[in-house]
Image (cartoon, helix red, strand yellow):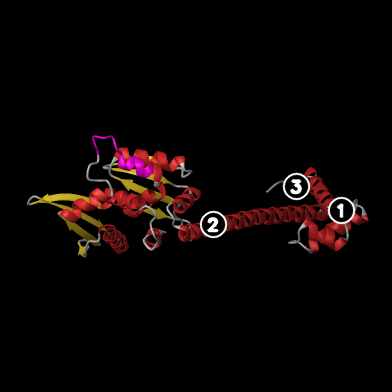
Amino acid sequence: MNITSDIIAELTDKDIGDKCAYLYALLRQRGEISYRAGKEYLTVDSMYGAVVSHAAGMIKDLLDCAVDIGRKSVDKPYYYFTLEGAAADDTLCCVRMSQPDKTDGYDAEGYYIGHSFCDYARGLFVGGGTLGAPSEDGDRGYLAEIRMWDPDSAAAACEAFNRVGVAMELTQRKTDSVLSTRKGEEAYNLLVLIGATDSALALQNLMLEQDTRALANRRSNFEIHNLQKSVDSAVEQTEAITYLADRGLTASFSEEDRSILECRMNNRTASSAEIAAMLGLSKSKVFRRLQKAIDIAKSEGMRDE
């Protein structure tokens, strides 16, 4: 069950604290810089229209420039906007991407990770994150992923996630570096970190429902196991009593013991506890007397089936 679209909808409907940190991460994930006829172009695209319109709105607020959103369809619909010339350069300068390796030693990515990691992480997820949760039939488990194209940036982000209490693993898949976790608790922590509180609450409720179902299943299996044991025991007891009765061996039993044997034969599906209640005896006494009948029957030649 993929709940990514719900998370994206929530995140793009909220205010961002550090817009530059968010946009920096989003542009690293979904942005493309190109040059045509000596002019610089910055294109941002996503399968989620809300991601594109949300980013366009922030750029418009920061730079007071018009941003037009388009839609293209190949196999799936994609949304995008393109900034050109001064608008593209101003956007890159605003989020500190115009010079990734500045000679003065300024590290924009390191700064955002160190000072605005929640907003930076939100941009990473909106740009390349997915979260799957188990469906009702439990065919799959939890899987939260953030795909990044730059291995160094992915390593820095992974370290930061783990430092703030979100345990993520880093793996390489073809050209992508993937931050991931398969633990529901860590997926919940990730959602809380990036500000998707409604989605985090929904995920927590799902985990509670799963735990409740698992506990109910364990109890049901335990009860079925006990019921089967009770049935098997009753069958063995009635077979033993029948074996003894056919050979006239029950006459040597005490009156109380015979009443227990008779009650078992008249109530073949009852448990030992139920027979004890019928006779006003303790469960342990009834069980011992019936076990005694089985032992005697076996000593007299009754074979185990």
Tag 1: amino acid: Thr
Asked whether residue 242 is in view, the answer is: yes
Instruction: Identify residue for label 1.
Output: 250
Q: Which residues are magenta?
A: 101-113
Question: Residue 277, percent across and down?
Answer: 84, 61
Asked whether residue 154 is in view, the answer is: no
Q: Is residue 126 left or right of residue 37?
A: right
Question: Disc 1 to disc 2, how far (Cα)?
Answer: 53 Å
Which tag, 3 or 2, sits closer to the chain's start?
Answer: 2
Residue at (48%, 43%) from the top-left corner? 165
Question: Disc 1 to disc 3, how far (Cα)?
Answer: 14 Å
**In the picture, which quadrant includes the N terminus?**
bottom left
Q: Secondary structure at mark 2?
A: helix
Label 2 Cα crowd, 10 Å radius (few <14 / some 14-19 / many 20+): some
The reply to whether discs 3 and 2 touch (Cβ–Cβ < 8 Å) is no
Residue 32 lies in the magenta stretch: no
Which tag, 1 or 3, sits closer to the chain's start?
Answer: 1
In front here: 72 or 59?
59
Query: Which of the labelled discs sits on residue 210, or is there none?
Result: 2
Tag 3: amino acid: Met
In front here: 242 or 180?
180
The reply to whether discs 1 and 2 touch (Cβ–Cβ < 8 Å) is no
Residue at (20%, 63%) from the top-left corner? 72
Q: Of all residues shown, which one is farthest toward the right?
A: 255
Q: Secondary structure at mark 1?
A: loop
Q: Secondary structure at mark 3?
A: loop
Instruction: Identify residue for label 3.
Output: 302
Residue 110 lies in the magenta stretch: yes
Tag 2: amino acid: Gln
